[in-house]
Image (cartoon, rainbow, N blue to C red):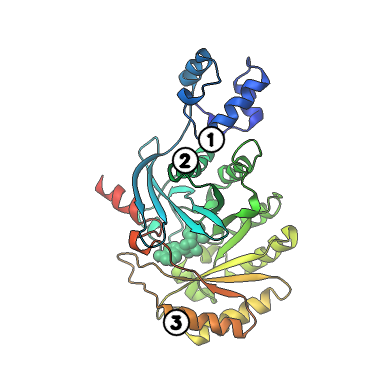
Amino acid sequence: MKTDILSLFPDELAKFLENEPSYRVKQLFSWIHKGATFDEMTNLPKKMREELAEKAYIALPEILRKYVSKLDGTVKYLFKLTDGQCIESVVMKYKHGNTICISSQAGCKMGCKFCASTQNGWVRNLTPSEMLGQVLVAQNDTGLRISNIVLMGIGEPLDNYDNVMKFLRLVSLDEGMNIGLRHVSLSTCGVVDKIYCLAEENLPVTLSVSLHHSNDEDRSALMPINKKWNIDSLLDACRVYFEKTGRRISFEYAVISGVNDNKSQADRLADLLMRKLPKMPFHVNLIPVNTVEGTGFTSEMKSAQIFQANLEKRGINATVRRKLGSDINASCGQLRRTEMEKE
Ligand code: SAH
């Protein structure tokens, strides 16, 4: 069995290379975290590279397909992992920096009714290296310096907790990609026990919470996780997360026509957030839903804007997410689904 060295911390890599001097470990770590292959590590002795290739591998995903938006330059990748599983990543150009949306699992077990990623179930967790690999390959392929990461692709990051924590620590190392965790957002459908764990990690990531409804009955119908942890327990965890980290929380709300988008629902959402989180700064991100085949959910831009205005009237900070890459179907989960169904 070969070792997945892109998933190792520097001290673990040093242990793995037991007989090499520490400067060699540093050189190797730096190469791996630039997305290099063994052949490209030209300042390492050939013999060392040959030995490495025999006992280790670098788990970079292969670009199976790539789509570039003619409208805004958004780039979407369908990646193939070493075992043939497919995942997706999207690179978006924003004024505040180039952002990549990465996947954390192959498939998802959360079962949200509007989401393409969960429709064919869950296959496995991604390793730290497979998450880093998405950033490295996309950065090298686009030639863009990626400064922001959102864990909003396929999968539920808090359902792959240990690997995601290791990924976050690795990606922020000075000697690695050096992406500050203040520039990383982790999105969850509401895995409450793990939000409490995350609050203790001392990692300044932004927590995004996919809320999508303001009452339990309707939220449970859309998002099965709500039957395990209801809205009350979710918002309690958000409050503790803020108290421990000082980080403002972002709530995602997909505005779905005829489901959760009328004025009284905006009012109920405002009531709920003001009542549960009176002293806490937060932001509501309204998402025009991407229509997923077989779900029947749609959005209207106009209702999203009215919903936003209603929240703002109540003193709640809200924005409507700009749709990027709409000509390349940039929302996650759909390419994997088509690809895996073909096989
Ligand atoms: N499992 C995590 C992260 C992945 S989903 C989570 O649930 O937050 C990232 C975001 O996309 C979530 O807010 C999710 O609710 C939203 N989403 C899923 N399917 C969507 C769709 N068809 N249209 C718009 N947003 C969607």
> In the rendered structure, are the residues bearing label 2 and label 1 in contact, judged by CB atoms less than 8 Å apart?
yes
Q: Which residue does the numbered mark 2 point to in the structure image?
A: 140
* Badge 1 density bin: few <14, some 14–19, many ≥20, Cα 10 Å: some
Amino acid carrying label 2: it is Asn
Q: Distance between the Cα atoms at labels 3 and 2? A: 39 Å
Marks 3, 2: nearer the viewer: 2
At x 62%, y 21%, the residue is: 24
Label 3 Cα neighbours within 10 Å, binned few <14 / some 14-19 / many ≥20: some
Residue found at x 61% / y 40%? 170
In the image, what residue type sits under mark 1? Lys
Residue in the foreground of this view, choosing between 323 and 227 = 323
Is residue 111 positioned above or below 214 on the image? above
Q: Residue visible at 60% across and 80% down?
A: 270
Farthest-out residue, left: 342
Q: Residue 130, image x and y in percent?
A: 48, 40
Give the spatial CA distance, label 3 vs label 1. Answer: 44 Å
* Mark with earlier residue (2, 1): 1
Taking the image as shown, residue 291 lies to the left or right of residue 178, namely left
Q: Which residue is mark 1?
A: 34
250 vs 39, left or right, is right
Crowding around mark 2 (Cα neighbors within 10 Å: few <14, some 14 to 19, many 20+) is some
Q: Nearer the viewer, residue 299 or 49?
A: 49
Residue to which mark 3 is pinned: 303
* Position of residue 40 measured from the top left corner of the image (x, y, whole percent): 48, 25
Task: Kindly state the secondary structure of the residue where label 1 is placed.
Answer: loop
The three-letter amino acid code for the residue at tag 3 is Ser
